[in-house]
Amino acid sequence: MTVPFELVARGKVRDVYAVDGDRLLLVASDRISAYDHVLPTPIPDKGRVLTALSGWWFEQLAPVLAEHDAGHHLLAAGPALVDEGVPAEVAGRSMLVRRLSMLPVECVARGYLSGSGTVEYQRTGAIVDVPLPAGLVEGSRLPEPVFTPSTKAAVGEHDEAIPFAGVVAAVGAEQAEALRSLTLALYRRGAEIAESAGIVLADTKFEFGTAEGRLLLGDEVLTPDSSRFWPATTWSPGAAQPSYDKQFVRDWLTVSGWDRVSEPPELPEDVVAATRDRYIKAYEQLTGTPFS
């Protein structure tokens, strides 16, 4: 892909270009990451799904953001970007956004016990500093959604869960309270919308920044890369759940015997195809719109 702007950052999935002093172009590639590694095999159309789904969620969540005197960074996406000088073949996977001063924490909300949260709970009865009731198992619904933030690691490094005091230390007490409140409000609304579409939103992460003193939701929102989506019809606590997200890839990597340290292996064609199908299924079921 040729983009006529300066490349200023490259993440695990997105490439960031400077359009001008106030705006950035986020281009979602088909790269997929797992266990803090970028895998060598792309997932066709993944970037287009992530972009389209994020744009849809920004619109759905705008009322919640407004209630908290916050906003989001998205200015435009899709074919309209051709007028901004973005090539047509790139526009479908691109978002034109406001530049933000990004906050140095990942804002994680969990409504169900899964993944690393289950491991931590089984060891301590809590997720970092958030105590949970006894008797929960993998896939259990929590009594209330919880805020379990983490560090924001660079590519190749590991995000690490931190207590709420760590958020306070990073951004100040007032900003930390605002992040917790807004993260949980966005999760609750997202979970309601997903539930109405027959999907369980088990957990998700948000990233926030500021512009002109205002808190803004940035990056991607409620995609299969940043969230765990489970079919509601098959949800059954006590085991790992079938999912519409990249957990399918993580599971294959675990079975493959990869040590999570060396270079990751190529994904087989059937795993690539099945992962693509899961991303598209999540988009279509959530939005009610066919993916093209």
Image (cartoon, helix red, strand yellow):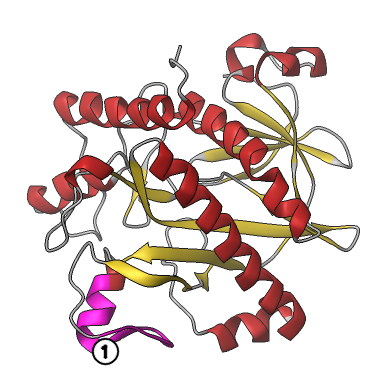
The percent position of residue 200, horizontal first and vertical second, equals 34, 48
In the rendered image, which quarter contains the N terminus? Answer: top right
Q: Which residue is at a point 42% across and 39% down the rendered structure image? A: 196
Report the side of 121 relative to 105 (left or right).
left
- Please state if 255 lies on the left or on the right of 118 as rendered: left
| Magenta highlight on residue 122 | yes
The image shows residue 214, relative to residue 181, as above or below, that is above
Residue 101 appears in the rendering:
no
- Is disc 1 surrounded by few (<14), some (14 to 19) or many (20+) residues within 10 Å? few
Tell me which corner region of the image, top left, top right, bottom left or bottom right, holds residue 77.
top right
Please, what secondary structure does the residue beneath circle 1 have? helix
**What residue do we see at 39% from left, 63% from top?**
111
Q: Could you say which quadrant of the image residue 136 lies in? A: bottom left
Left or right: 181 with respect to 38? right
Residue 5: image location, x then y, percent? 75, 28
> Residue at 58% of width from left, 38% of height from top?
57
Residue at the outermost front position = 196
Residue 36 appears in the picture as rendered:
yes
Q: Which residue occupies the foreground of this view, 241 or 274?
A: 241
Name the residue tied to disc 1.
Answer: 124
> Is residue 10 positioned above or below 154 on the image?
above
Residue in view at x 75 percent, y 61 percent: 68
Q: In this picture, is 45 found above or below 168? A: above
Region rendered in magenta? 118-133
